[in-house]
Image: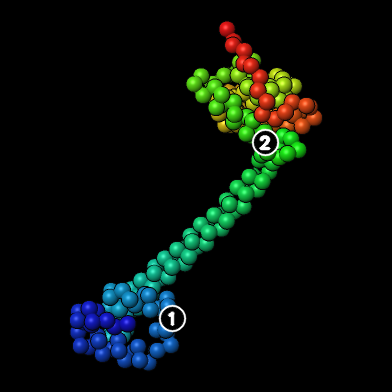
């Protein structure tokens, strides 16, 4: 506890007072908080001054220094706990969301389970990667190469078509679509999920083979 660097800066009187106090209070100096506090040479010097001259001023300085040190320990511990629990809560919510929404997007569109609705939607961007993204549902539908997806998209309501177009052609987020259409983000998410379910149901219930292609029509 009384290292050489601290010892060299102290008078003989201070060193003797400290060594005697530490010998008489061995249990106290086994406490990690106490050991950490007196690892600071300034705190050790405050203790030495208090032992040699037990004035109210010296005691108050030592007590104030320990209060500040102990508060720092408790506050650091609090922050660590807060960060830990926030991180756990964040990951729980993220896992919950990932398990709630991708159920539709990642669901198989046929009994073989080889193709998902998400893969069919992503295939659109590959087919038209050299073109500007379609911002209206008519152009978007005409750009769809997969036959089953083309007809499934045609079964959607006008609102559903617009939301799907903005989400998967222009890659807009639900919040961005909500701002554009001046409705709530929750309403956009509900519409998008409902549209994906409707498309998946149509594809499973009809005889268009998943992945079959149709000839694209040019939009003048």
**Residue drawn at (38%, 79%) of the image:** 35
Q: Which mark is residue 182?
A: none
**Residue drawn at (36%, 71%) of the image:** 65
**Residue drawn at (22%, 78%) of the image:** 5
**Residue 4 seen by the camera:** yes
Identify the residue under disc 2: 115
**Quick one: quadrant of the N terminus?**
bottom left
Q: Mark 2, residues whose alpha carbon is within 10 Å: few (<14), some, or many (≥20)? A: some
Classify residue 212 by image quadrant.
Answer: top right
Task: Identify the secondary structure beneath mark 1.
Answer: loop
- Left or right of residue 157: residue 140: left
When the figure is inspected, residue 40 is found, relative to residue 94, above or below; the finding is below
- Report how far apart the C-alphas of labels 1 and 2 lie in the structure: 63 Å
**Residue drawn at (23%, 82%) of the image:** 4
**Residue 179 seen by the camera:** no
- Left or right of residue 84: residue 50: left
When the figure is inspected, residue 56 is found, relative to residue 199, above or below; the finding is below
Q: Position of residue 136 (x, y in %)?
A: 61, 17
Identify the residue under disc 1: 31
Q: Position of residue 198 (x, y in %)?
A: 75, 29
Classify residue 133 by image quadrant.
Answer: top right
When the figure is inspected, residue 84 is found, relative to residue 203, above or below; the finding is below
């Amino acid at each position: 506890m009384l290292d050489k660097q601290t010892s060299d800066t102290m008078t003989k009187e201070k060193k003797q007072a400290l060594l005697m106090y530490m010998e008489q209070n061995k249990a106290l100096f086994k406490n990690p908080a106490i050991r950490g506090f007196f690892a600071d040479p300034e705190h050790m010097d405050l203790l030495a001054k208090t032992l040699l001259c037990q004035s109210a001023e010296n005691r108050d300085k030592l007590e104030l220094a320990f209060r500040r040190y102990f508060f720092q320990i408790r506050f650091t511990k609090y922050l660590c706990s807060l960060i830990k629990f926030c991180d756990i809560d964040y990951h729980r919510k993220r896992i919950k969301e990932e398990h709630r929404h991708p159920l539709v997007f990642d669901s198989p569109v046929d009994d073989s389970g080889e193709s998902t609705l998400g893969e069919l939607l992503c295939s659109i961007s590959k087919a038209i990667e050299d073109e500007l993204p379609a911002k209206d549902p008519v152009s978007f539908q005409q750009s769809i190469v997969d036959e089953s997806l083309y007809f499934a998209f045609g079964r959607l309501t006008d609102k559903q078509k617009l939301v799907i177009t903005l989400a998967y052609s222009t890659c807009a987020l639900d919040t961005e679509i909500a701002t554009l259409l001046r409705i709530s983000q929750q309403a956009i998410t509900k519409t998008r999920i409902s549209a994906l379910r409707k498309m998946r149901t149509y594809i499973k219930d009809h005889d268009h083979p998943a992945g079959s292609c149709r000839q694209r029509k040019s939009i003048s």
